[in-house]
């Protein structure tokens, strides 16, 4: 799949942008603060209806404007689809081929994008929440329907937490409602766990091989999922659901006291391992970066190789954070994929590609074709 044309209005500093990217490598060159990440964010919003920078999508609306809009024509398997998203302060309007999409779950999967940003390089040593979002982003690109489960889980969690904070707000008996939420979190949580585990099983061999190729130092990299509720992640879903529900029931007293839900997949973590040791405590800075580069290139290979229509890749100025050899490795992987890539950079020399490449310049929120030198 690839983006044939893109229209952006009032997304952060992008006031009015319209252009037709090339089918392979699109390089966006600009100084700091000109709108490069805003462009990738706009493309990502058309894929996930979420931003990768903020959980409050309305933040993307250009200051002083009532709404933001991103529209894209996507070519996929000989067909073209029109995606159109308008973001308002408290709502969004999503259209597919000029028709309102309802439910929104029908939208996902039409367009997939893998994002690789410099912040990702801090993931192994960052917060568990950051790692969960990083993992969830990958799982979603791999299986689009995952995002619907995530959103349902998050909704049930918000309702449970609201009840725990203020039981008087609900007309029903608190404990009775809590039982309902526990059941929902069990069922939906088991689905999340199973999908995360299946994705990790799929990516792990490529991740290990990529790390070995990147570092060539005989070190072993691995991934370990750390569930808050113990259970067989590859076992039957109803059993996992039961385990989560029981764990929630056991924590009730504590959860009432604290006003929040203390266990479940929203508390899980992912540990990057280096020679069997948790990388956050054991690995060097360079090794941590190599772990993330291995993850992202493994993800690119995994998706490029699966079901025919590889996603679009969004690379946000990653090259300036990698040394020359690792940067070269990344571009080898991109060149071997068939995907359309959107690559931002402050230094065009870092982008080690010559064929099938279109350069654009980004200045003060405007995007134009670079005069070819
Ligand atoms: N809601 C908003 N409304 C208007 N402008 C905004 C909004 N949010 C951010 N900006 C502006 O967007 C610009 C930053 O754009 P962006 O993050 O895309 O820069 P960049 O080109 O990626 O820079 P860098 O190379 O430093 O990463 C800043 O000038 C900022 O003031
Ligand atoms: Mg940026």
Image (tube, helix red, strand yellow):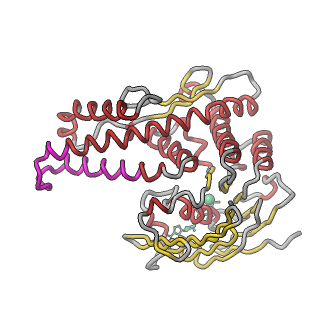
Please tell me whether residue 53 is drawn above or below residue 284 in the rendered image: below
Start-end of magenta stretch: 150-178
Say which residue appears at 39% left-offset and 26% top-offset.
231
Q: Quadrant of the N terminus?
A: bottom right
In magenta stretch: residue 329: no
x then y, percent, for residue 337: 76, 49
x then y, percent, for residue 109: 55, 57
Q: Quadrant of residue 358?
A: bottom right
Front residue of 327 and 168: 168
Identify the main secondary structure in magenta.
helix
x then y, percent, for residue 146: 48, 48
In magenta stretch: residue 160: yes
x then y, percent, for residue 121: 61, 42
Q: Quadrant of residue 221?
A: top right
> Regarding ligand 2, which quadrant of the image does it lie in?
bottom right
- 126 relative position to 176: left or right: right
Say which residue appears at 70% left-offset and 75% top-offset.
19
Say which residue appears at 35% left-offset and 30% top-offset.
239
């Amino acid at each position: 799949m690839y983006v044939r044309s893109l229209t952006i209005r009032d997304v952060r500093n992008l006031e009015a942008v319209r252009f037709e990217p090339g089918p392979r490598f699109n390089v966006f060159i600009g100084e700091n603060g000109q709108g490069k990440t805003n462009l990738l964010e706009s493309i990502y919003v058309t894929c996930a209806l979420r931003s990768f920078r903020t959980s409050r999508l309305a933040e993307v609306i250009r200051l002083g404007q009532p709404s933001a809009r991103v529209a894209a024509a996507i070519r996929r398997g000989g067909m073209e689809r029109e995606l159109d998203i308008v973001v308002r302060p408290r709502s969004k309007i999503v259209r597919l081929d000029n028709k309102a999409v309802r439910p929104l779950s029908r939208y996902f999967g039409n367009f997939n994008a893998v994002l690789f940003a410099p912040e990702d390089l801090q993931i192994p040593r960052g917060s568990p929440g950051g790692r969960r979002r990083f993992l969830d982003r990958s799982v979603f690109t791999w299986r689009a329907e995952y995002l619907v489960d995530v959103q349902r889980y998050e909704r049930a969690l918000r309702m449970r937490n609201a009840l725990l904070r203020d039981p008087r707000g609900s007309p029903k008996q608190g404990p009775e409602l809590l039982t309902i939420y526990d059941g929902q979190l069990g069922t939906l949580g088991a689905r999340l766990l199973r999908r995360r585990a299946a994705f990790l099983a799929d990516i792990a061999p490529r991740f290990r091989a990529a790390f070995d190729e990147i570092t060539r130092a005989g070190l072993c990299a691995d991934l370990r999922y750390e569930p808050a509720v113990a259970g067989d992640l590859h076992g039957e879903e109803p059993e996992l659901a039961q385990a989560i529900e029981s764990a929630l029931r056991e924590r009730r007293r504590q959860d009432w006291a604290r006003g929040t839900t203390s266990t479940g997949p929203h508390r899980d973590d992912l540990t990057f391992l280096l020679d069997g040791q948790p990388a956050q405590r054991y690995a060097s800075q360079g090794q941590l970066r190599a772990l993330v580069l291995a993850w992202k290139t493994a993800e690119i290979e995994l998706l490029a190789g699966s079901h025919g229509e590889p996603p679009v890749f969004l690379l946000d100025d990653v090259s300036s954070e990698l040394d020359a050899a690792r940067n070269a490795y990344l571009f080898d992987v991109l060149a071997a994929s068939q995907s359309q890539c959107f690559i931002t950079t402050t230094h065009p020399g870092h982008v080690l590609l010559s064929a099938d490449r279109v350069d654009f310049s980004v200045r003060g929120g405007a995007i134009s074709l670079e005069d070819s030198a």
